Image: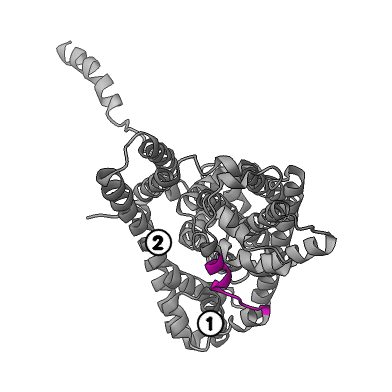
Amino acid sequence: MEITNHLEKTEPENTEEPKKRKKLGLTSRIFIALILGMICGVVFHYLVPEGFVRDTVFVEGIFYVIGQGFIRLMQMLVVPLVFCSIVCGAASIGDTKTLGTVGVKTLVFYICTTAIAVAVALTVANLINPGVGVDMSSILVDTSASEKLGQAEEVSVVDTLLGIIPTNPIDSLASGDMLPVIFFALFVGIIIAILGRKAETVHSFFEQFNDIMMQMTSMIMVVAPFGVFCLLSRTFANIGFDAFLPMVKYMVSVLGGLVIHCLIVYMILLAVFARVNPIMFLKKFVSVMAFAFSTATSNATIPLNIETLDKKMGVDRRISSFTIPLGATINMDGTAIMQGVAVVFTAQLFGVPLGPVEYATVIATATLASIGTAGVPSVGLITLSMVFNSVGLPLEGIALIMGIDRILDMARTAVNITGDAVVTCVVARQGGRMDKAVFDDPNAGKDVDEVKVQMS
């Protein structure tokens, strides 16, 4: 009897023991860090007095070092990861005819979505009229900065096309010039596919090195929440909300265009061309969008984008390894939207009339300007000078939007990488390279959100 009573008393304790506390996934940790970073930055901007402690120790010290350190870690991965991914992707597809079909489809969708993005931006801007009624006296204009941006790079379409072919591929790899890197990697991958067993050793080397880079990515992503927190804290500590007020209509126009393009245009593409559930896509992709928003760089998001498409959506890595790095370089829909709104804003502000011909020129120029644009923060401001020049707008308009561009840059980067993923899903689905069962499974790829690092 005593033994029975003892077992009855201890049995509940044994059943409770296996239960473990659920850990927060990467998505949750990034969102928490993002929100806390904004709050912390606002507190520092408005409640903490200016001085050595706030400005030197925290804002330009701890926040800057940790935030930029994290960005540098991600940028460290970009060139070797993109090169190996495209080599492996091109080599694994094998059939050059199939590779050509995938490449042509990808380019067509990228160019078309960018052109649609500019058209959406121009429509939204003309409905809101962001440049009408803006008080110029309340905006600090740094004309010297705009002139430097305008003079930074005047690259013609011909030079852009010729720049794709590297004169020295090693120099392109060293400098991170992505279009020549992609071209050379694609060439190497095609040659490996043609040679077959003769190049088996080289093929294995690239595959193994690619695995090393993916593992390195997983390890770096462990510290992502800390980097996100510091990046957002520094941004909001520097600008607060004061710079936003005079430019509210401009910001609403850009954000409105981004939302329409992301939640309507992209979702229609998924439903019509990929025949998948757009809501499921958004649920699974939201963590990548949050990461892109916080880092404001498409290149840094490449590893997480490829991993998410593979594990959560069933996209063949051989496709995503080719389309995602390419998209991070030439597909800048969010940037194109900003440029379209900026054109209308500046034209209204300075009283420059724009007709159908000018709007068509803007669509064509902004689409071309996105090709070869580096996936780094605020690069859209540099290419914006090319768009302004095409319709005769003063470059002072660029200076007006520089003060608030950081937040908009974060939002449009999230749209940029979403466009890359949407086109990848479409191309993979049409080519029979997507496992729809994985895409439809809400629990697929949970390990992506719980980045595991094996430690002995």
- The number of numbered badges drawn on the structure is 2
- Along the viewing direction, whichever of 412 and 134 lies nearer the viewer: 134
Q: Is residue 150 magenta?
A: yes
Q: Quadrant of residue 17?
A: top left
* Magenta extent: 147-157
Asked if residue 159 is positioned above or below residue 44 in the image, the reply reads below
Residue 358 at x, y percent in the picture: 79, 63
Residue 379 visible (yes or no): no
Earlier in the chain: of badge 2 and badge 1, it is 2
Q: Secondary structure at mark 2?
A: helix
Instruction: State left or right for residue 98 relative to residue 287.
Output: right
User: According to the image, label 2 marks what residue?
Assistant: 74
Left or right, 38 with respect to 325, comes to left
- Relative height, residue 41 to residue 414 (above, below): above
**Mark 1: amino acid:** Phe
**How busy is the neighbourhood of tag 1: few (under 14 within 10 Å), some, or many (20 plus)?**
many
Q: Quadrant of the N terminus?
A: top left
Three-letter code, disc 2:
Met
Q: Nearer the viewer, residue 201 or 264?
A: 264
The location of residue 259, given as percent across then percent down, is 65, 45
Q: Dividing the picture into quarters, in which one does residue 30 lie?
A: top left
Residue 213 shows in the view: yes
Alpha carbon separation for disc pair 2 and 1: 22 Å
Say which of 119 and 55 sits in front.
55
Q: Give the residue furthest to the front.
A: 137
Circles 2 and 1: CB distance less than 8 Å?
A: no
Residue 302 locus on image (x, y percent): 49, 61
Residue 402 within the segment the image draws in magenta: no
Residue designated by label 1? 184
- Judging from the image, what secondary structure is the residue with disc 1 in? helix
